[in-house]
Image (spheres, helix red, strand yellow):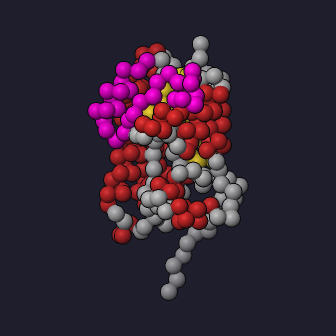
């Protein structure tokens, strides 16, 4: 019997790539996203692999529990929905951007996990894969709240493992580095030119790379849990300490 993966934020980037990759491997898909027309395009493209598409904003707690709380037989929850907004320093940031990141990257992930997890516990199997970021472990100027939200994803994943010990449910935090998708376009609010500069002269990760990594993670032997993976392109690494000098 084919396994089922529930992917949040499936209409672009990592989520869309994972949907296409898992479908090609014979999995059944439950896909969520805010943009109905994109979900319908995926449904048409992936055909028999689609178990259900759900128009959903993960920030809406009532909607999440109404739409996801009754799902059964979800083998993998891929908490992919998330975003970054802006690169301004903390004293100059739009506070609304901070709140959207917290509501999506933290609260949305919490809601989806809480809605889906009981059926996994009842069945005694399942796997939650949370898309974090290298920003959750390594700071950079302008990363402020975005990095904070991804640090939450990292620690929440660890604490889920502690809570779920003995329930035969796996949890993984997957933390990508620089990746080329709609991520930077969203961060810079549709400024394509500014987004392109992020990747200029470098070879970033691609959504397909993350899809292949997620598939590898969830296909380890049942007794193996991949706690965390941090993945960067070869063209990215850590910089030296910054020192301000008068």
Q: Is residue 192 left or right of residue 146?
A: right
Q: Is residue 243 left or right of residue 112?
A: right
Residue under the point 47% across and 34% down = 39
Residue under the point 39% across and 51% down = 101
Residue under the point 32% across and 60% down = 95
Q: Nearer the viewer, residue 199 or 121?
A: 199
Q: Within the magenta stretch, is there residue 24? A: no
Image vertical order of residue 225 relative to residue 193, above or below: above
Residue 52, how many percent across, how many down?
46, 24
Image vertical order of residue 241 relative to residue 128, above or below: below
Residue 24, how many percent across, how many down?
65, 28
Image vertical order of residue 181 relative to residue 141, above or below: above
Q: Nearer the viewer, residue 212 or 30?
A: 30
Magenta stretch in the rendered image:
43-72
Q: Nearer the viewer, residue 128 or 108?
A: 108
Q: Within the magenta stretch, is there residue 48? A: yes
Residue 193, how many percent across, how many down?
55, 65
């Amino acid at each position: 019997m084919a396994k089922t993966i529930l992917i949040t934020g499936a209409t672009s980037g990592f989520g869309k790539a994972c949907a296409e990759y898992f479908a090609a491997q014979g999995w059944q898909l439950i896909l969520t996203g805010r943009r109905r027309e994109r979900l319908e395009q995926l449904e048409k493209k992936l055909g028999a692999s689609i178990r259900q598409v759900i128009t959903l904003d993960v920030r809406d707690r009532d909607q999440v529990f109404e739409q996801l709380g009754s799902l059964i037989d979800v083998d993998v929850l891929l908490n992919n929905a998330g975003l970054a907004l802006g690169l301004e320093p903390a004293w100059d940031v739009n506070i609304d951007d901070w709140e959207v990141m917290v509501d999506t990257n933290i609260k949305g992930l919490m809601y989806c996990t809480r809605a889906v997890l009981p059926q996994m516990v009842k069945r005694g199997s399942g796997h939650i894969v949370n898309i974090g970021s290298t920003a959750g472990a390594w700071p950079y100027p302008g990363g402020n709240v975005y990095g904070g939200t991804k640090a939450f994803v990292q620690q929440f994943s660890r604490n889920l493992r502690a809570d779920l010990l003995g329930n035969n449910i796996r949890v993984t935090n997957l933390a990508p580095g620089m990746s080329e998708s709609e991520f930077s376009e969203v961060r810079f609010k549709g400024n394509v030119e500014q987004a392109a500069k992020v990747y200029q002269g470098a070879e970033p990760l691609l959504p397909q790379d993350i899809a292949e990594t997620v598939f590898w993670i969830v296909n380890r032997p049942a007794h193996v849990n991949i706690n965390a993976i941090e993945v960067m392109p070869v063209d990215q690494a850590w910089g030296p300490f910054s020192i301000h000098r008068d």
